[in-house]
Image: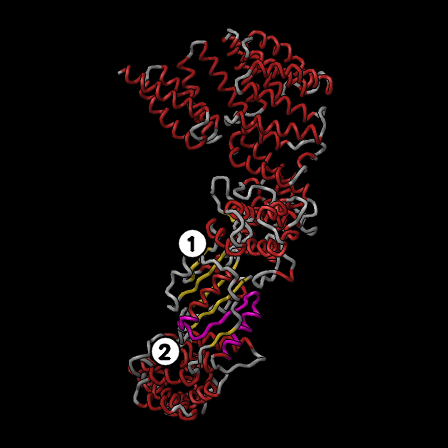
Amino acid sequence: MGLPFGDPVGGWLVGVLGDGLLGLIRGSEEERLLGTACSAAVAVVLEQVAPDDRPRLRDGLELCFRGGPVAEAEVGSGVGDGLRAAVSAQVAWLAATVANDRAGRPFFDTVGIEQEWLAEELYSAFTEALRHVAARTGLAELARSLAAERLQDGVDELLRRVAPTPARSVVGSIPQAADCFQERAGIGGLDAVAPGGGGRCQVLTGMGGVGKTQLAAAHARRLWQAELVDVLVWVAATSRPRIVAAYAQAAAAVGLASDPGDPETSARSFMGWAERTGRWLVVLDDLQDPADMRGLWPSARGEVVVTTRRRDAALLTRGRHQVDVTLFAPAEARTYLRAKLGPDDPPEQLDALAAELGMLPLALAQAAAYLIDAGLDCAAYRERLTDRRRTLADVLPEDDVLPDDHHHLLAATWALSIERADRARPAGLARPLLDLVSVLDPHGIPEMVLCSAAARRFLAARRDAHHRQPVTDDEARDALRVLHRFGLISHEPGDSGREVRVHRLIQRATRESQTSLTSTAHAAADALTEEWLEFGPDGLGPVLRPNAAALHRTTGTALWTWNGQAHPVLFHAAASLGSTGQVDAAIQALNRLHTMSRRLLGPAHPDTLALRHNLASWRGAGGDAEGAAEQLTGILADVTLVMGPDHPHTLIARADLATWRGASGDASGAARTFADLLPDTVRVMGPHHRHTLATRGDLATWRGLAGSPEPAARDFEALLADAEAILGPDHFYTLATRHNFLRWRGETGDRAGVAAGLNALLADQLRLLGPDHPATLALRMELVWSQGSTGDPQGAATSTEALLADLLRLLGPHHPDTQIAHRNLAYWRHRADTHD
């Protein structure tokens, strides 16, 4: 009486003998014979049991071998330590799992046999089944090994007969070495592994064009030429069908049974073979989707090298080693260009060309080919490269003459990645987000700019028409991670406002692919302005300014066509320079903007007049108050003529003229001018407008400077109450008004109350603005001075030392505030020594 589950029993037996065995004999005559022999062997055991007990034992065995776990006893030192132990463990599982009958009797009591007897009989039956397979298939050595109870020797013999060791073979086509190929000493990991040592999976990641394929090919050739591998499989891993087809080809190459009509089965056979030998190398080149490798990762017995642009966590599971392939180092780029172009070009020209191409190996190769074909030297080629009228395609070879068997021009290299990224969740956001990234600073873009409300509005407008819902902050950040995973940007959260970096050529290719660069420029400018307004002119200046400069540089005159005027981001960038102490740089920037504004908008345009106004103000901030007042006199006349006496710009010009006249020594005159200006400001702008509040503050300040501190303190006290009611207690202007009120209150003699108030203000500024905000640093400097002035010079010296360390870190040694702190530290140390 045979069992209908010979195949499950055979599968269990193969699992005990070794995971690779079933894969090697699947679909073969050996597999069919093993299932038949196992079924017959179990039938022999059942014949020895009483007829009434056979159905229950039969059901128990079917449960055992169809649903029970494969025993994990090792096979290697003989039957007693291998198959017998495995069978005993399986029978023990049966005894523990099957429920008692209704009378409460255990399973083996109900079938009238002993557990130990069944285990021994099954062991004998299975051994006989293996001998039967050996005899029927002519594996005489296997039969002799089994007869001598050398089970592992018999299994090894079966493996050798079913999968004989192949001759050395290469499957697939290894790319030829690039002309003037450069070894990459700075790439850690790939060459650090002992060649041919096996047991490693190395994942080479990096953006398209950095040379991952060439590095993998060089590694493969080294191992092959050194005869450290017997089988080398090069897989163009751009899709799952191509991977499966390559594995099936490899199965045939190593002598396994292969069915051209069933590549999946052939691929599994190759993977089973790979589990039993270690002298092989599989290179999976240009893996585009980690999901394509599901169930197709070779074992760790040999060596696997993957090249991919992807950075998904699924690629970097335990046992896989990531190798980051980066750009050429400057010395590597120069060496490459010298080898390609010969000795004529000066080193500085080679270095400049490499820098303009971003040290990208693919770009250097294609540029060198174009340069040679066109008969240009480096200097002439660089002129073409930087000519804004030319696209990348205009300064690179045509498709049919690409060097080193390149398949695509530079821009097309990234096109597929962009397309795939745009399909990934959140769908439709990766491409427009890369559009924004393409016009900003490649060396560092704040994440908050790309996730701002202005940026999200742009993403929503550019997304597919079927998804016109608002884009959330989480979706924008997820889109950043998608671009990072696809190797199009680098996104490192927490990198101090420079979380996003991108290669300049990806930026250029992306800009050139856009149909409306102007709308992208305006959206990016809106996003930068949003952050400047949020954090003040100084808070993020060091990272926002380079982004504004890159935006202006890469988008031409787009920022001068924003609603018929210059975009405010241009003014914020210049003002940010001055507010951090770089007055000369601010004046230079404003002069450049003024020249462009006269040319593009005309001399009477409000923006041109505003730039003249800003230039005069920064001239005064640079120490020339009289010159600033003189310039503002002329500007006020022009603004009044063009815009009228009640225009806000006219009122602001009147206020600034009064300020610089006061700074020139006429404090009383400044106070009178502000007193005349305040009613006009209230009439035109209303009592709650920020300019009205600012005019009230200026009037109070100049009254105090003119010798009336008590009225100044009262004016600021009233202004503070209104600012808290209108703007709220946490608004930046409200905090500044509190500071001014305490200052003038101190001038009236209440120093103890002022000290307590300033400390409370510092706590609020630390909470709201952070420790590195310029307003927080200025208040700390004032408190230190108050500390020393009230009799604690040693404490003032200690506090100044801590403040100076922060100023050096944030502003550098040449900033005016840093230099003041240096002088203050020397002063308080001297006072402390004298005081002691």
Residue that sits furthest to the left in the current view: 836
Taking the magenta stretch, the answer to whether it contains residue 545 is no
Instruction: State the image quarter where residue 291 is shown.
Output: bottom right
User: Could you tell me the amino acid type at mark 2?
Assistant: Gln
Viewer-side residue, 249 vs 477: 249
From this view, report whether residue 836 is shown above or below residue 455: above
How many numbered dots are placed on residues in this image? 2
**Where's residue 816, x and y in %?**
46, 24
Q: Is residue 501 visible?
A: no
- Which tag is nearer the camera, tag 1 or tag 2? 1
Upstream in the sequence, badge 1 or badge 2? Answer: 2
The local secondary structure at tag 2 comes to helix
Looking at the image, residue 568 sits to the left or right of residue 169; the answer is right
**Where's residue 596, x and y in %?**
66, 31
The local secondary structure at tag 1 comes to loop
Viewer-side residue, 718 vs 88: 718
From this view, report whether residue 112 is shown above or below residue 609: below
User: Could you tell me the amino acid type at mark 1?
Assistant: Gly
Looking at the image, residue 367 sits to the left or right of residue 139; the answer is right
User: Magenta segment range?
Assistant: 224-252
From this view, report whether residue 138 is shown above or below residue 85: below
Viewer-side residue, 729 vs 293: 293
Taking the magenta stretch, the answer to whether it contains residue 231 is yes
Query: Disc 1 marks which residue?
Result: 186
**Where's residue 18, x and y in %?**
39, 78
Label 2: how many residues lie within 10 Å, few (<14), some (14-19) or many (20+)? Answer: some
Residue that sits furthest to the front in the current view: 344
Label 1: how many residues lie within 10 Å, few (<14), some (14-19) or many (20+)? Answer: few
**Where's residue 404, x and y in %?**
56, 62
Q: CA distance from mark 1 to mark 2?
A: 54 Å
* Residue sitting at x 68%, y 29%: 597
Query: Disc 2 marks which residue?
Result: 90
